């Protein structure tokens, strides 16, 4: 399956992408995760991306598109993938269409996660992420067993620089202006499916698998 997750910051895209990718045996390709790994590794790409990310703006398309092209060209993505955080505007979506056409394929589904903005702010302000393995927690909804320590790998948990309330508000504005138009774009292509992303994580996963036509 070749699928895309779309939804506002904090909708639970990363949380669901991790579970769905494992359920569907396809790699999760998260542009946010790739950028963050480059920032912490101090690479040229990371240096270019950091100021945009800290402000909550989109990294320029030419940088992002080339990064995705390289990732989708890797052997593990040949038979399918789940994109999380890409595309994020209509120009990126058109580029993705072109890349898939070159590969002789197309998207099977675009899954939209719907959550209201107050919930998003609550989710993002309580989020903590593992520096080592990237697992995501929430201080109230999904706390680690030991404060500040990842249950999965023992790594240190940290708060993302772009999870400050002023940056969260800006990211939401960027979402409304640049990313939300993708909903109509993919509806027109006949690949859009939408689910409510509220409730327990496992309930949302169940809705997602049914919407993708892969649930029991
Ligand atoms: P990115 O990392 O993609 O950030 P985002 O889209 O803003 O999404 P988030 O990671 O904030 O949220 P999420 O939906 O994954 O939620 P999560 O599962 O963590 O991008 C970061 C930056 O990179 C961008 O601002 C931009 O600068 C750059 N970038 C990335 N892609 C780009 C692109 N294509 N083009 C240009 N620039 C790009 O969940 C959030 C919290 O909620 C967690 O604490 C979680 O535990 C909790 N939670 C999850 N599900 C539930 C639930 N059902 N109930 C209660 N809590 C829940």
Image (spheres, rainbow, N blue to C red):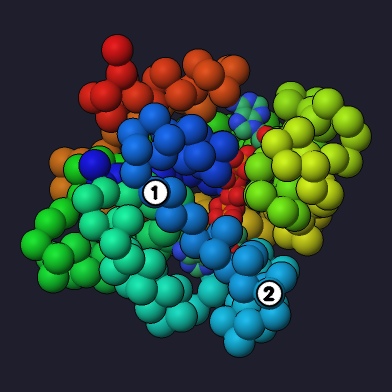
Q: What's the residue at 74%, 48% (across, down)?
A: 130
Q: Secondary structure at mark 1?
A: loop
- Res. 49 visible in picture: yes
Q: Is residue 94 above or below residue 130?
A: below
Q: Is mark 2 within 8 Å of ligand 1?
A: no
Q: Is residue 151 above or below residue 76?
A: above
65 left or right of 158?
Answer: left
Q: What's the residue at 41%, 82% (across, down)?
A: 62
Looking at the rendering, in which quadrant would you find the C terminus?
A: top left
Kindly identify which residue carries mark 2. 41
- Res. 4 visible in picture: no
- Please state which of residues 159 and 25 is positioned toward the viewer in this rendering: 25
- Please state which of residues 204 and 30 is positioned toward the viewer in this rendering: 30
Residue 30 position in % (x across, y down): 49, 55
9 left or right of 111?
Answer: right
Residues at marks 1 and 2 touching, judged by CB atoms closer than 8 Å: no
Residue 80 position in % (x across, y down): 26, 49
Kindly identify which residue carries mark 1. 27
Q: Is mark 1 within 8 Å of ligand 1?
A: no
Residue 107 position in % (x across, y down): 21, 50
């Amino acid at each position: 399956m070749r699928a895309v997750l779309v939804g506002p910051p904090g909708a639970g895209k990363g949380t669901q992408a991790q579970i769905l990718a494992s359920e569907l045996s396809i790699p999760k390709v998260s542009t946010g995760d790739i950028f963050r790994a480059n920032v912490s590794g101090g690479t040229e790409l990371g240096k270019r991306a950091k100021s945009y990310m800290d402000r909550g703006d989109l990294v320029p398309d030419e940088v992002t598109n080339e990064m995705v092209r390289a990732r989708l060209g890797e052997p593990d993505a040949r038979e399918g993938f789940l994109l999380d955080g890409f595309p994020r505007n209509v120009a990126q979506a058109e580029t993705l269409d072109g890349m898939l056409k070159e590969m002789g394929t197309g998207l099977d589904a675009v899954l939209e996660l719907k959550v209201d903005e107050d919930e998003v702010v609550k989710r993002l302000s309580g989020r903590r992420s593992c520096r080592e393995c990237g697992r995501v927690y929430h201080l109230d909804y999904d706390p680690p067993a030991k404060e500040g320590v990842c249950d999965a790998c023992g790594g240190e948990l940290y708060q993302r620089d772009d999870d400050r309330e002023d940056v969260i508000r800006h990211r939401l504005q960027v979402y409304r202006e640049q990313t939300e138009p993708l909903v109509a774009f993919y509806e027109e292509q006949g690949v859009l499916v939408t689910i409510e992303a509220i409730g327990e994580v496992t309930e949302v996963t169940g809705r997602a698998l049914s919407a993708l036509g892969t649930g029991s």
